[in-house]
């Protein structure tokens, strides 16, 4: 489907947390904006399966899958064998000596990956912006927490974030718009275990409504965020920024519009983008002109379209890739806790979120109670119990509802073996090279996994949980939900791709507004809130320059 106009003030590629807010801010100030979205527009009231009997087998209803491949596999270090992923029913889940590439958990559709995110809305630790200055590790961001703070507040009010009065290392100018969610029964049991360990378990900050807000009802605590929210009480971009962007009358969204190339003009050594080429759902190619282009496809697809457009600032596009360092352990508790009731992550232990090289690894991390895969009887049967017949049925009757878990995410540091590039052989449906992901864990990541493994098991034991029935880990699987860094933000064009206003060094009318720009990954914080805040700031700076003439 062609766009309504031949030329726009700005084209935004991607409608997730980097594209949706940016498009709204520009459109709200009168700019003509076109959003190109490779996937469909989902209808929350019809497309999600949580109200159907077979919901547990369906998962999220992916309609458009972006193709990508993987590079070399890392050889597993047997020194960390205790970190391997396994469950009681199947044993080891990776029986090789290589780290297995499982999945990059991306959603293509209006709203992007927020369609199946679990609502966590974290501000980045204020010290994480200055890793080099404070700890001698990684690099500093070219902006600080104070610069981003008002944009955090703006996003929180638009999407409806529920949270406590204070969160460590995150000073606030305004309170959260919504009161925090109460801890589930299972999390209250974990809280008792934390107290025995001298730890504080605090309500999480989530874009999940705890009361009526933005014409949506409060959460019903079904814990099914990852399947897609049919009630619109989760603050995904499709039900928050997209409607207000379209209400301006200045924002057009094209679905199944697969951006293939950014058109660049080079006159007398000065580069500028002139528009974007895209394919519609019939495979027909279109070219649309624009004064500005913002790329917001995520830290895998953004470098892909840039590289396919021969845009590669100092050969840095795709470098400094960072993925999700995670560990999760599930155990049976003697009491039935029904951990599937509530929201996915209702509370957090922030004890180790502040960077600290004295721990044996420099980055921060966080831990949270989790239901893991213990969402329904099918997963209990396939993962936590083995055997068959009467004994198996008896085991299900005895242990269903008893699983409880702790999960953690830690900082990932860039390394030379971890990057995104173009696959030299595999092409997409339109004949273009696909993105190829390669990821290796360094010593810091392995040490942080080791720390999360021991600490999580200690907390579960203190909480009264006995038999461990499943662990899942980045040690032997690449299974990334959060990815960052392939278009690093910085002041120096020799070591970064975009500047502090998210404009491409050397191409001032090209922006990148997703987690590709993150110089560091943070200590386990979910990135969506920071992406949204950065994109609003970039839009404000662009509008300010335009008003100057």
Image (cartoon, rainbow, N blue to C red):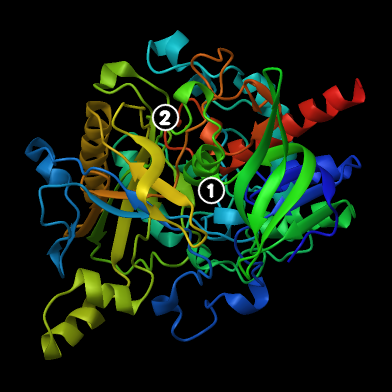
Relative placement, left or right, of 323 versus 143 is left
Q: Determine the residue positioned at 19% across, 40% down.
A: 74
- Give the residue number, with chain letter if any, for mark 1: 120
From the viewer's perspective, tell me whether residue 424 is left or right of residue 115. left
Quarter of the image for the C terminus: give it.
top right
Tag 1, which secondary structure?
loop
Instruction: Please report the residue visible at 36 percent of the width from the left and 45 percent of the height from the top.
Output: 424
**Residue at mark 1 to residue at mark 2: CA–CA distance:** 27 Å
Q: Viewed as shown, does residue 83 lie left or right of 418?
A: left
Q: Residue furthest bottom?
A: 390
Outermost residue, left direction?
78
Q: Return the disc, 1 or 2, that comes first in the chain's sequence.
A: 1
Depth check, front residue: 93 or 394:
93
Task: Place residue 290 in its image quadrant.
Answer: top right
> Is 311 drawn above or below residue 126 in the view shown?
below
> What is the x, y in percent for residue 349?
41, 39
Under tag 2, what secondary structure? loop
Nearest to viewer (mark 1 / mark 2):
2
Q: Are marks 1 and 2 in contact (CB under 8 Å)?
A: no
Assign the N terminus to one quadrant of the image. Answer: bottom right
Can the viewer see residue 175?
A: no
Across and down, in percent, residue 522 comes to 45, 30
Image location of residue 102, percent across then percent down: 30, 56
- Position of 411 with respect to 52 (left or right) is left
Question: In the orientation shown, which residue stands out farthest toward the front?
Answer: 268
Relative image position of residue 415 (x, y in whole percent): 32, 26
In terms of image quadrants, where is residue 324? top left
Tag 2 residue: 319
Q: Which residue is more in the foreground, 15 or 122? A: 15
């Amino acid at each position: 489907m062609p766009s309504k106009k031949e030329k726009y003030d700005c084209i935004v590629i991607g409608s997730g947390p980097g594209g949706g807010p940016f498009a709204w801010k520009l459109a709200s100030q009168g700019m003509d904006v076109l959003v190109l979205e490779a996937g469909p527009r989902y209808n929350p009231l019809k497309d999600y399966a949580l109200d159907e009997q077979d919901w547990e087998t369906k998962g999220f209803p992916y309609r458009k899958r972006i193709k990508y491949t993987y590079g070399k596999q890392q050889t597993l270090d047997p020194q960390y064998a205790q970190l391997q992923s396994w469950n009681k029913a199947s044993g080891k889940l990776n029986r090789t000596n290589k780290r297995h590439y499982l999945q990059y958990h991306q959603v293509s559709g209006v709203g992007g990956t927020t369609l199946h995110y679990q609502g966590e809305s974290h501000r980045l630790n204020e010290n994480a912006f200055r890793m080099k200055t404070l700890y001698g590790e990684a690099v500093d961001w070219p902006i600080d927490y104070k610069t981003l703070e008002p944009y955090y507040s703006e996003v929180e009010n638009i999407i409806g974030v529920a949270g406590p009065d204070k969160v460590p290392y995150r000073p606030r100018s305004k309170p959260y718009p919504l009161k925090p969610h109460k801890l589930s029964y299972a999390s209250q049991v974990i809280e008792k275990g934390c107290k025995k360990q001298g730890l504080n378990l605090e309500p999480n900050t989530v874009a999940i409504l705890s009361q009526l807000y933005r014409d949506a009802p409060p959460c019903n605590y079904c814990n099914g965020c990852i399947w897609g929210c049919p009630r619109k009480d989760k603050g995904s971009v499709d039900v928050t920024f997209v409607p207000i962007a379209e209400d301006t009358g200045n924002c057009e969204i094209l679905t199944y519009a697969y951006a293939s190339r950014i058109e660049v003009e080079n006159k007398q050594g000065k580069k500028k983008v002139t528009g974007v080429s895209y394919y519609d759902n019939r495979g027909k190619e279109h070219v649309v002109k624009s004064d500005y282009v913002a790329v917001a496809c995520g830290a895998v697809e953004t470098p892909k379209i840039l590289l396919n457009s021969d845009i590669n600032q100092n050969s840095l596009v795709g470098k400094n890739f960072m993925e999700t360092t995670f560990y999760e352990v599930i155990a049976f508790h003697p009491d039935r806790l029904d951990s599937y009731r509530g929201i996915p992550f209702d509370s957090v232990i922030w004890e180790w979120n502040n960077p600290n090289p004295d721990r044996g690894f420099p980055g921060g991390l966080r831990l949270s109670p989790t239901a893991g895969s213990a969402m329904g009887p099918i997963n209990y049967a396939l993962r936590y119990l083995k055997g068959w017949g009467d004994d198996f049925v008896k085991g299900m009757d005895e242990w269903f509802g008893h699983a409880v878990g702790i999960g953690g995410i830690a900082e990932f540091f860039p390394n030379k073996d971890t990057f995104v590039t173009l696959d030299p052989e595999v092409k997409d449906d339109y004949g273009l090279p696909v993105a190829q992901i390669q990821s290796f864990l360094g010593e810091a990541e392995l040490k942080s996994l080791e720390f999360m493994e021991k600490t999580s098991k200690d907390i579960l034991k203190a909480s009264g949980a006995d038999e461990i029935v499943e662990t899942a880990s980045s040690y032997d699987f690449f299974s990334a939900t959060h990815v960052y860094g392939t278009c690093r933000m910085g002041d120096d064009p020799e070591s970064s791709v975009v500047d502090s206003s998210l404009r491409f060094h050397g191409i001032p009318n090209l922006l990148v507004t997703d987690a590709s720009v993150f110089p560091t990954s943070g200590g386990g914080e979910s990135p969506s809130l920071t992406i949204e805040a950065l994109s609003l700031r970039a839009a404000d700076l662009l509008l300010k320059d335009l008003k100057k003439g």
